[in-house]
Image (spheres, grey):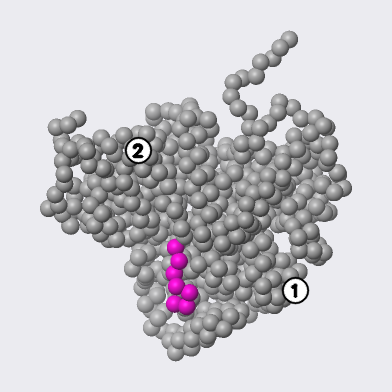
Amino acid sequence: MRMKVEGETKEIRVLMAKPGLDGHWRGAIVVTTALRNAGMEVIYVGNQTPQAIVEAAIQEDVDVVGLSILSSAHLKLIPEVTRRLHERGAEEIIVLAGGIIPREDVPLLKQAGVDEVFQPGSKLTSIVNYVKHRVIHKRSPSAI
Amino acid sequence: MQHKESEGKFETGSGIPVKVAYTPDDVRDLDYERDLALPGVPPYTRGVYPTMYRGRLWTIRRYSGYGTPEETNELYRHEYREGQTGFSIAFDTPTNSGLDSDDPRVGADVGIGGVPVCSLDDMEILFEGLPIEKVATSVTGKAFSHVQQAMYFAMAEKRGLELKELRGTTQADILTALGCMNYIDQIAPRHAIRLLADLVEWSSEVAPRWHPVSFDTYNARENGVNAYQELAILMADAIAYIEEERKRGRIPLEQYIRGFSFNMGSHNDFLEEIAKFRAARRMWYRLVKDRYGIDDARCHILRLHVQSSGITHTTQQPLNNLMRIAFQVLAAVLGGAQSVHANGYDEGLCLPTEQSMLLSIRTEQIVQHETNVINTADPLGGSYYLEWLTNELETRAWQYLKRIEEAGGLVEALESGWLQGEFRKAIIEHQKRLETVEVKVVGVNCFEMEEEPYQVRLFRPNPRAAEIQTEKLQKLRRKRDNQKVEEALRELREVTKQGENVMPAVMKGVGAYATMGEICNVWRDIYGTWSTPIGL
């Protein structure tokens, strides 16, 4: 089990990745920038296999993994990330997804352990607030 | 009586301020013969052919491919029966990255967003039963498209066709894969352009009717830059290829440039996009004629393929995208495009379905056969506003081109990450304007709805594509003459190192059924791999 300092003072750490080969990077760019502007530490690793994403997430000791995908491979690649996180005992890392993901696939992804899915057109402030809220809650569930 | 203007800024999509009305004063300096003239006459502002769409309608070219080569072959046969006169191969991302379907990193991406073509075998399957001598095909590749074209050519040769009879276009451009999107396992732009310039040289000798390169700013535009930046990047892209050949001086520049073609996006600012296409033709003419002193008229004309802009389509209320697509197609046509691809209205939700692609083709056919806009060339030419805007875009584009050249030209601007920085800035700025509703998007930041009003069918890619392709590759590697493959790859390594034109060796490798991945690995070994500096 990895230990984590409790409370709100520790900087929120996020790993942003694009699973597989999907080259569309606009969403990842805007979300990475917005989270950084909100004071978070964001490590952008670009296109990676699920295995490499999980390794990087553990090594970087992040609170959140953000996955941006517009290729239609989300049902294959995203559950593989959550499964591998689970296998590595890192299921406390919050997994968020965004991109071209049909609404009907959202329950499937949530069942697989994805915390939230952001559709195109989501406001950056709502993504930033969501991340803050979830991380703080996770670190100390009583503090809401 | 006083008429009040509504609040808000009036400017084009590129942020150019617009007046309430334009008059002859705004185009005072316009010289008809010098700046406009008739279609088919320099500077070609009004169109590249004298009769324009009366002579030949633009090609309705659907960019398509999915699943396996077998599945896509069925789709192409269907398209051919429906009367389509050109194919545009959408390769999947592994193929466009120069990777085989059985690479352990690519499984989930095989057969989605395009078709896998790992070897000549796949290319033969893809076009089985199709009379390629009667159609024009777009080999819509990326930075390794010389290998994809070689596969198409080898397939034609095996059928006994003459390469010099083949018609089509290869999108042998470095910009998209190396600057606009993240493709893994690429080689640096300076090396990629060397190989693609080899393709242009070689094609101009063996297949003079083929366009070996289509400079593509569609994806640059999707990365947030505006209309005049797109124009400048388009010119910088072509300049980079010309400069590559000038360094070598192997063939006359006229012969090298003759086969160039171009590919741009069509966005939402209807009149600005029309002005943009007109400005592109005039800029190209002036560049070739004035900067390079080339008098061959075949080098002066900018043949243009246009695609409706994916980034303008919304996930919300997806049927609204049909309207956006129709306006964008109309802008391309009023701007004089030679070939148009209309996106599927559902691409904000999934890969396009049969139904959405049919609607896209019908949209183009309605413009061709019902609106009468084809009756006369450049019907908006002479409008005070449009001519003023065409001038304005051109002026701003030359200025921005200067900035790209100060950054070292396109190749250097990609290697240093300068251009990617421009994209990043533009993307972030656009997002800001969306959130402050400075830019309105119907259904997203205005006229939103809680419940989705339209039911849309979704496309699901073949989940077994990677498995099927992997089995085929294993079989291929067993049954082909592996010694011949080794020899061909060795030769390719040698000619690459010696700086000779690689295409004859690529043809030999492809003909021996060497795979996409095996061939591209030769260059990865020599040059090393490179990933685009996105700057995040």
- Chain ID, mark 1: B
Residue at image mark 1: B252
> Residue B146: which quarter of the image?
bottom right
Query: Measuring 37% from the left and 77% from the top, which residue is drawn there?
Result: B474
In this view, B285 is above or below B222: below
Q: Measured from the top left, where is residue B74 in percent x and y? A: 50, 62
Crowding at mark 2 (Cα within 10 Å: few <14, some 14-19, many 20+):
some
Tag 1 secondary structure: loop
Query: Measuring 31% from the left and 46% from the top, which residue is drawn there?
Result: A41
Q: Residue furthest top?
A: B1
Question: Which amino acid does the dot numbered 1 rest on?
Answer: Pro
Residue A38 image label = 2
Q: Is residue B414 left or right of residue B254?
A: left
> Is residue B502 shown in magenta?
no
> Residue A18: which quarter of the image?
bottom left
Residue nearer the viewer, B131 or B136: B136
Query: Measuring 50% from the left and 34% from the top, which residue is drawn there?
Result: B433
Residue nearer the viewer, A39 or B288: A39
Residue nearer the viewer, B425 or B140: B425
Q: Is residue B410 left or right of residue B259?
A: left
> Is residue B527 shown in magenta?
yes
- Chain ID, mark 2: A
Specify start and end residues of the magenta stretch as a single range.
B525-531
